[in-house]
Amino acid sequence: MGACAPAWGMAGTLPGLINMMQNMGDNSAIIKEKIRTFRSEWEESAQNTT
């Protein structure tokens, strides 16, 4: 029974990983918005220091 433990671990990990990947969706819009926000805040702070 103990020899099968790694196989049972993988049998639980793979469906969980697939489920997680399906629920992630398209995060590129979120990443682009975070970059845009960071860039605008950085530009504002650069203007305020000069």
Image (cartoon, rainbow, N blue to C red):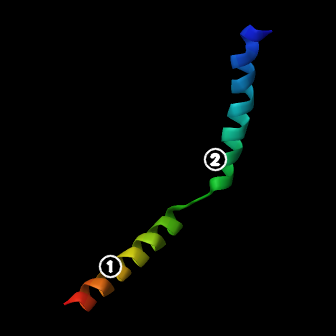
14, 9: nearer the viewer: 9
How many numbered badges does the structure rendering display?
Answer: 2
Give me the residue at 63% from left, 47% from top. Answer: 21
Question: Does 24 appear above or below 44?
Answer: above
| Rendered-image quadrant of the N terminus | top right
| Rendered-image quadrant of the C terminus | bottom left
Q: Mark 1 belongs to which amino acid?
A: Trp
Residue 8 image point, x, y percent: 75, 21
Q: Residue furthest right?
A: 1
Label 1, residues with CA under 10 Å away: few <14, some 14-19, many ≥20: few
Residue 10 lies left or right of residue 26; in this view the side is right
Instruction: Determine which residue is flagged by label 1.
Output: 42
Give me the residue at 69% from left, 32% from top. Answer: 13
Which of the 4 image quadrants contains residue 19? top right
Which of the 4 image quadrants contains residue 7? top right
Task: Give whichever of discs 1 and 2 has the lower sequence position.
Answer: 2
Q: Mark 2 belongs to which amino acid?
A: Met
Say which mark, if any, is on residue 21.
2
Q: Nearer the viewer, mark 1 or mark 2?
A: 1
37, 47: nearer the viewer: 47
Label 2, residues with CA under 10 Å away: few <14, some 14-19, many ≥20: few
Residue 28 lies left or right of residue 40; in this view the side is right
